[in-house]
């Protein structure tokens, strides 16, 4: 198995990515970001995974949204640590 230190998605399954996005944004917000019917009409992890595994363009968009979320979380954590240091 190859190490991929610069790949933020390395080791993550599509199911984990989708679950994290749903937990963070919810189905309605995900649908606004990428208009996929399975996010709007009776959404479920199972039906969405089935669609995303068959539809590369949609999977790429979901992965990009997840990478953006990771970046936002890192910035937030860095900002929080800077606040803690300045309070000392």
Image (cartoon, grey):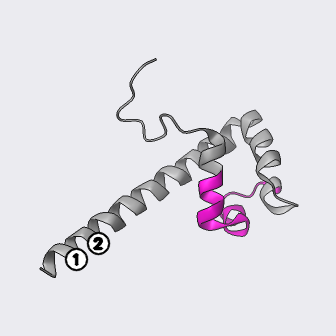
Relative to the observer, which residue lies in front, 20 or 39? 20
- Relative placement, left or right, of 76 versus 36 is left
Horizontal side of residue 87 vs 15, given as left or right: left
Residues drawn in magenta? 19-37
Q: Say which residue appears at 60% left-offset and 38% top-offset.
A: 13
Label 1 – label 2 distance at C-alpha? 5 Å
Question: Which residue is at a point 41% across and 62% down the rendered structure image?
Answer: 72
| Label 2: few (<14), some (14–19) or many (≥20) C-alpha neighbours in 10 Å | few
Q: Which residue is the site of mark 2?
A: 80
Secondary element at image label 1:
helix
**In this rendering, does residue 61 appear at all?**
no
Q: Which mark is residue 83?
A: 1
Packing grade of label 1 (10 A; few <14, some 14-19, many >=20) is few
Q: Dots 1 and 2: beta carbons under 8 Å?
A: yes
Residue 12 vs residue 30, the one in the foreground: 12
Residue 6: percent from left, percent from top: 36, 35
Q: Is residue 28 magenta?
A: yes
Q: Is residue 63 above or below residue 25?
A: above
Pick the quarter of the image with the C terminus.
bottom left
Residue 54 x %, y % = 76, 34
């Amino acid at each position: 198995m190859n190490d991929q230190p610069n790949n933020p998605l390395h080791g993550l399954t599509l199911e984990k990515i989708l679950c994290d996005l749903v937990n963070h944004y919810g189905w309605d917000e995900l649908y606004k970001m990428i208009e996929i019917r399975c996010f709007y009409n009776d959404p479920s992890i199972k039906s969405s995974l089935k669609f995303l595994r068959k539809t590369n363009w949609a999977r790429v968009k979901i992965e990009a949204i997840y990478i953006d979320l990771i970046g936002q979380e890192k910035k937030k954590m860095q900002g929080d640590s800077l606040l803690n240091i300045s309070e000392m």
